[in-house]
Each structure stands twice: as C-alpha cells, then as structure tokens.
C-alpha cells in the first residue's frame, strides 16, 4: 500500500502529470509566407550564385579546348579533357612534381603549426610567469605586419643558413617550411589560447591530484577537448600555405622544387602565351586536397563540438 500511494493518500499513478500537448503551428497564408520568408530565400539564392559564378567559370575554362577564357559562354560547346592531358603530360612543365611539393610543404607546415601553436597557447593559458602579457602583446603586434615586408631580411638569413645547413637554407623545401612556421606562430597562439581558456581548470586540478604531469594533461586532456579549434587551425594553415606564392617565388629557385602556386603561375606568365585553360585545369586539381581535408576534419569538428568536457 505504501508503494502505490503517496503520504497524502493520493494514488501514485494519478499524481504523475502528463505534459500538455504541443500547440499546433498555425499555417501561414501564401501572402504571409512571401512577406516573412520569401526574401530570405531570394537573398540566399543571390549569394550562392555570386559565390559559385567564379567556380563555374573556372570549370568551363578547364574543359574549353580553345585554352582561353575570353568567350562569353560559361560552359564550352565542345568540352574536352585536352587541358588536363596537356597539364599532366607536358615534359617542360613538371606539374606532378609541383603538385607533390606543394601538398607536402602545406601538410607538414600545417601539422607543425598546430603543434607549436598548441604548445605556446597552453603555456600562455595555463602558466603564470613574468613577461606573459608582454609576450602575448608582442605576438599580436608582429602579426600586424605582413610577412612579405621582411622578405629581404628572410632572403639574406636563408642565404646565410644555406652556407652552414644547406638542407634547410635557400632553395630548399625544408627551409621554406620553416619560414612558414615562423610566420603563422603568432596568430595560431592567440587563436588557440582563446579556446584553451574555455577548458575548465577543474580538469587540470583533478588530473594533478591523480599524479598527472603537465605533459600528460596537455596531450591527454587539452588536445582531445580542443579537436574543433585544432581542425580549423590545421585547415586554414594548409589552405594558406598551399596558395602562398610571394615567399615561395623568392626562396625557391630550382624549377623542380617549385610549389603548386609557383608552378601554376608559369602557365600565365608569358606575354604572348597565356594558357588559361591549362591553368584552370590545374586550379581544379589543386582544390582536391583542400576538399578532402575539409571533409575529413568536418567530422572531427562536429564530434568535438557535441562531446562534453565535464560530466556531473
């Protein structure tokens, strides 16, 4: 009897209140829908068309056998794969080597950018030391100036480094990657520190009670919980490095060591021989690794945002 009744004598089943039914949504009249939502769809379509028009134009130029972008039609009447065939079989333009060099340099630079930026951000976020604020402000101040302003100094330094360590000096992919690492250090540290500050300090304290070191906390707690921001940082670093041209064009001198951006520029650098169709075909192939990495990291971003960090 005690299990089926409450202290007031009311049966337990009758004490449970059923939630009221959800109110039915009022169906909008056609003129109301047009007034409230139609303009949003119109704006969305216009924005999508504005963003996709250059992509469609590049697609048309890549399949245009005339190897030109001077026509008025976006899609050619007689599309062909001649531009792709010329791109991959031309012995005077080693596109495959440029493609490989660009992807390797961009991948290595993005990975090390994320790693070094995470270490610096963890130190600025979790430790309290003399010169911490000054160091953060210095990194922010340095980022106000574009890296190509120091191109002359970088060129001289890399030339001197080549005399001692030719593997990481001028005209080397490893040296170019080191320059990219130095240029992206500051912005990544600031970007990652802002996210590390949102990770509760209670997780660090609980791990320290269990005997964890700072290294174990960094690798086992902070980095797994920061998967979203690490994915975004890696994607932005890969894309920016793959498309970079100014530094690479000055530091790389051997034709076989050119990166993807430098190689594509060769197709449109001639005064009377601009191969826009071949250039467009190479631009489409250059977007493949970016799309693949985005698809891979997209899942990590969604899973990282949906997983909680503290369980009650």
Image (cartoon, helix red, strand yellow):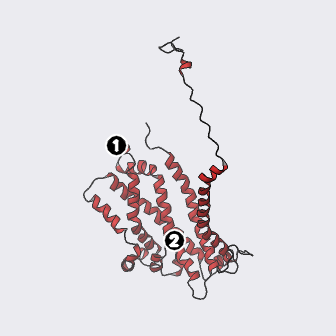
Point out the tag, 1 or 2, that comes first from the N-terminus.
1
Neighbourhood count class around disc 2 (C-alpha, 10 Å): few under 14, some 14–19, many 20 upward:
some
Q: Which mark is residue 302?
A: none
User: From this viewpoint, is residue 107 visible?
Assistant: no
Left or right, residue 103 beside residue 128:
right
> Where on the picture, by quarter, is residue 282?
bottom right
**In whole angstroms, how far apart are the C-alphas of marks 1 and 2?**
42 Å
Secondary element type, mark 2: helix
- Furthest-top residue in this view: 1
Neighbourhood count class around disc 1 (C-alpha, 10 Å): few under 14, some 14–19, many 20 upward:
few
Left or right, residue 289 beside residue 231:
right
Q: Residue at x 28, y 59 (%)?
A: 133
Q: Position of residue 290 (x, y in %)?
A: 56, 64
- Furthest-left residue in this view: 130
Q: Position of residue 41 (x, y in %)?
A: 61, 57
Residue occupied by mark 1:
205
Left or right, residue 247 beside residue 103:
left
Q: Which residue is more in the foreground, 104 or 276?
A: 276
Q: Which residue is more in the foreground, 181 or 79?
A: 79
Q: Position of residue 19 (x, y in %)?
A: 56, 29
Q: Residue at x 30, y 62 (%)?
A: 135
**Where is the C terminus found, in terms of image quarters?**
top left
Residue occupied by mark 2:
243
């Amino acid at each position: 009897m005690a299990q089926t009744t409450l202290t007031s004598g009311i049966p337990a089943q009758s004490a449970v209140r059923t939630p009221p039914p959800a109110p039915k949504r009022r169906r909008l009249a056609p003129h109301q829908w047009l007034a409230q939502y139609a303009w949003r769809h119109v704006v969305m379509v216009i924005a999508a068309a504005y963003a996709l028009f250059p992509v469609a134009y590049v697609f048309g130029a890549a399949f245009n056998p005339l190897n030109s972008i001077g026509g008025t039609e976006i899609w050619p009447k007689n599309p062909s794969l001649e531009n792709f065939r010329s791109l991959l079989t031309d012995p005077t333009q080693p596109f495959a080597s440029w493609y490989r060099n660009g992807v390797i340099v961009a991948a290595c630079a993005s990975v090390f950018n994320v790693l070094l930026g995470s270490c610096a951000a963890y130190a600025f976020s979790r430790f309290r030391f003399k010169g911490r604020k000054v160091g953060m402000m210095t990194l922010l101040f340095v980022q106000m100036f574009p890296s190509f302003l120091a191109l002359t100094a970088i060129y001289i330094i890399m030339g001197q480094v080549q005399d001692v360590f030719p593997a990481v000096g001028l005209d080397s992919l490893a040296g170019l990657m080191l320059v990219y690492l130095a240029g992206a250090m500051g912005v990544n540290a600031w970007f990652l520190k802002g996210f590390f500050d949102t990770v509760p300090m209670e997780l660090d304290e609980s791990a320290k009670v269990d005997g964890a070191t700072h290294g174990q906390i960094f690798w086992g707690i902070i980095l797994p919980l920061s998967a979203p921001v690490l994915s975004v940082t890696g994607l932005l670093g890969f894309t920016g490095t793959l498309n970079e041209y100014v530094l690479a064009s000055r530091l790389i001198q051997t034709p076989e060591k050119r990166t993807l951006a430098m190689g594509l520029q060769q197709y449109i650098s001639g005064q009377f021989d601009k191969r826009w169709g071949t250039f467009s075909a190479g631009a489409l192939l250059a977007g493949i690794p970016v799309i693949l990495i985005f698809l891979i990291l997209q899942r990590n971003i969604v899973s990282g945002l949906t997983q909680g960090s503290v369980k009650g």
